[in-house]
Image: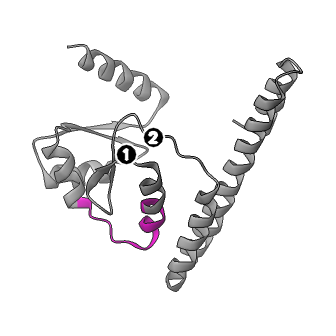
Amino acid sequence: MNIFEITKEIRALDVEDWEYVQKESLNFCRQQELKKANDKISKIIDNGEFGRYEECAEIMKEALSSITINKPNVPIVMNTLAEAVTETEKIKLILVDQIVGMVRWRETINYMFTHGVSTFYEVGVGNVLSGMVKRITKEVRTVNVVSPEDIKGTLGGIISDSTH
């Protein structure tokens, strides 16, 4: 949601709903801080300043400190741990660790496969990740999602799979 959409919503609200307006304005500001932190980190990495990763981790830690992460509906498999996490504070810590920690890709894919994940979705152009998954375990299905039509088709397939 951008500032124009928020403003449009505010205008449509009853004047007595200022608590909502304040909450949404604060959320928007927090999202902007996280975006600024991400942009700053991306510039450091894009410039090849690899010796500044610890600084990048601190930037992310500070930005995440004001963000509320809701408890996920399903466990999130973190690729620096190769295990599922549901605790919101632990998720924040691991997001910071992603910047300086080693990614455990093979272990992450194996963890997901042994815990019942049989289909992996790669969103975006290309199929590099799908190929990597298939090299780790050939017994899974990979689906590439690139266009809006792919998204609709994929969602339809997920919904019909879950009802059978």
Tell me what residue is drawn at x 62 percent, y 70 percent. Answer: 43
> How many marks do you count on the picture?
2
Spot the residue most to the bottom: 51
Q: Which residues are magenta?
A: 94-105
- Please tell me whether residue 3 is drawn above or below residue 163 in the rendered image: below
* Residue 108 in which image quadrant: bottom left
Badge 1 marks a residue whose secondary structure is loop
Q: Residues within 10 Å of mark 1 (few under 14, many from 20)?
A: some
**In the depicted view, which residue is nearer to us: 35 or 155?**
35
- Please tell me whether residue 136 is drawn above or below residue 6 in the rendered image: below
Tell me what residue is drawn at x 28 percent, y 15 percent. Answer: 160
Residue 48 in sight: no
Q: Residues under labels 2 and 1: Cα distance?
A: 6 Å
Look at the image and say whether residue 44 sits in the magenta stretch: no
> Could you tell me residue 64's position as x and y percent?
58, 58
| Amino acid residing under circle 1 | Thr
Pointer 1: what residue? 86
Pointer 2: what residue? 71
> Could you tell me residue 147's position as x and y percent?
46, 32
Mark 2–mark 1 CB contact (< 8 Å): yes
- Please tell me whether residue 36 is drawn above or below residue 139 in the rendered image: below
- Please tell me whether residue 155 is drawn above or below residue 42 in the rendered image: above
| Amino acid residing under circle 2 | Lys
Q: Quadrant of the N terminus?
A: top right
Q: Earlier in the sequence, mark 2 or mark 1?
A: 2
